[in-house]
Amino acid sequence: MDNPVGFIGLGAIGEPMAEHVAKVHGAVVWNRTVAKAETFANRTGATAVQTAREVVERTKDVITCLPTSAQVLEVVQSVGDAWTDQHLLVDATSGDPAGSREVAAYLHRYGAGFVDAPVSGGTDGAKAGQLTVMLGGDEGWAARAMKVIDPYAGKMQHVGPVGAAHALKAVNNALLAVNIQAVGEGLAALVKLGVKADVALDVINASSGRSNVTENLFPKRVVTRAWPRTFRLALLDKDVDVAMKVLKETGVPSGAIRTAKEAFTAARQALGEEADHVEFVKEIEKAAGVEIR
Ligand code: NDP
């Protein structure tokens, strides 16, 4: 393919996203653990390279999908003067608005464009090529970014200037965290009262308290005791932290989100960096002395 897209960061969600990109545009990929990129290339026909700089030298449109904006800045700086005014960086990381502005300012020196384009929909949405993508940045760059990411997107929405999409993604994930905590506490109490968890969820899912957490996460991961690892608790804790910063910067008081932040940070310390975000519920179960089933 004539204009392959660069992809940096083949993690839990990055890899299935990159696979869709490789199918449609062709891809040049780099991953910190290089063996992962090589395995990916063998499977998909993409080209694996040894450095992020090589990705930028061989492509014009580059996607990053890394844990936080700090790693994005580190990688972008490692590329140095290989960036040109022909380049666009589309950052699919759930980053932070201040970090995105710093990355954008660095790229601007070389004339390269930047769009923050975090995703929602989880690893299942990524595998299906049906992620929701919010985009922050100049309209022209955002229009170009949409063509690049279309292979893995179900919905794309330009939401404002650089950093706006990262702010929106952080608020979305803070809502997810608040919801996991509230549903976990509520269901633990109901189970202790003798109501079966699947019965309670069935009723809630036909009532006003329903959400993705009650419709999908609890029935498929908690009640079944399956606890799959698809999205690290550490990453959700990071997202709630970004949301707290967004609230602080805008002078908005935080009650619910602050409570979730404290609880998720404590769970991260107890369960470690590899635990899944839904495993947070195990901490509620431990404190309540009950299993939600
Ligand atoms: P993972 O932890 O699975 O993967 C992280 C990726 O970043 C790996 O490729 C890792 O390389 C690479 N990496 C880590 N540190 C560095 C570094 N210092 N320099 C270069 N590369 C580095 O994360 P996910 O794929 O789950 O998440 C990526 C982003 O997407 C996060 O911001 C997350 O919040 C967001 N997200 C994740 C979702 C999910 O369901 N998983 C859903 C929506 C958003 P290596 O292989 O060497 O470790």
Image: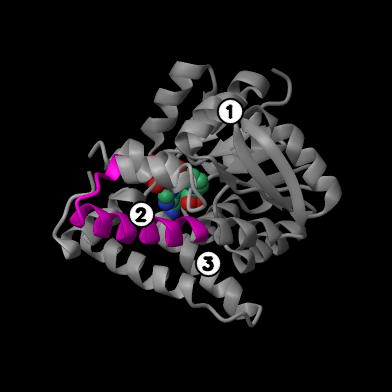
Please give the residue where the numbered disc 2 appears in the rendered image.
233
**Label whose residue precedes the other's in the sequence (3 or 2):** 2
Which element type, helix, strand or loop, lies under badge 1?
loop
The quarter of the picture where residue 201 lies is: top left
In the rendered view, tell whether residue 134 sits above or below residue 284: above
Residue 195 in magenta stretch: yes
In the rendered view, tell whether residue 49 sits above or below residue 172: above
On whether ligand 1 comes within 8 Å of the CB at mark 2, the answer is no
Q: Residue furthest right?
A: 140
**Label whose residue precedes the other's in the sequence (3 or 1):** 1
Circle on res. 242: 3
Q: Main secondary structure of the magenta part?
A: helix
Please give the residue where the numbered disc 1 appears in the rendered image.
129
User: How many C-alpha atoms fall within 10 Å of the one at disc 1: few (<14), some, or many (≥20)?
Assistant: many
Q: Nearer the viewer, residue 108 or 100?
A: 100
On whether ligand 1 comes within 8 Å of the CB at mark 1, the answer is no
Residue range of the region highlighted in magenta in the rendering:
175-198
Q: Residue at 71% across / 40% down in the picture?
A: 156
On whether ligand 1 comes within 8 Å of the CB at mark 3, the answer is no
Q: Amino acid at mark 2?
A: Leu
The quarter of the picture where residue 64 lies is: top right
Residue 187 in magenta stretch: yes
Q: Amino acid at mark 1?
A: Gly
Residue 190 percent coordinates (x, y) = 27, 55
In the rendered view, tell whether residue 204 sits above or below residue 27: below
Q: Is residue 61 left or right of residue 6?
A: right
Circle on res. 142: none
Q: Quadrant of the N terminus?
A: top right
Circles 3 and 2: CB atoms closer than 8 Å: no
Give how far apart the Cα atoms at labels 2 and 1 are: 23 Å
Q: Residue at 44% across / 18% down in the picture?
A: 42
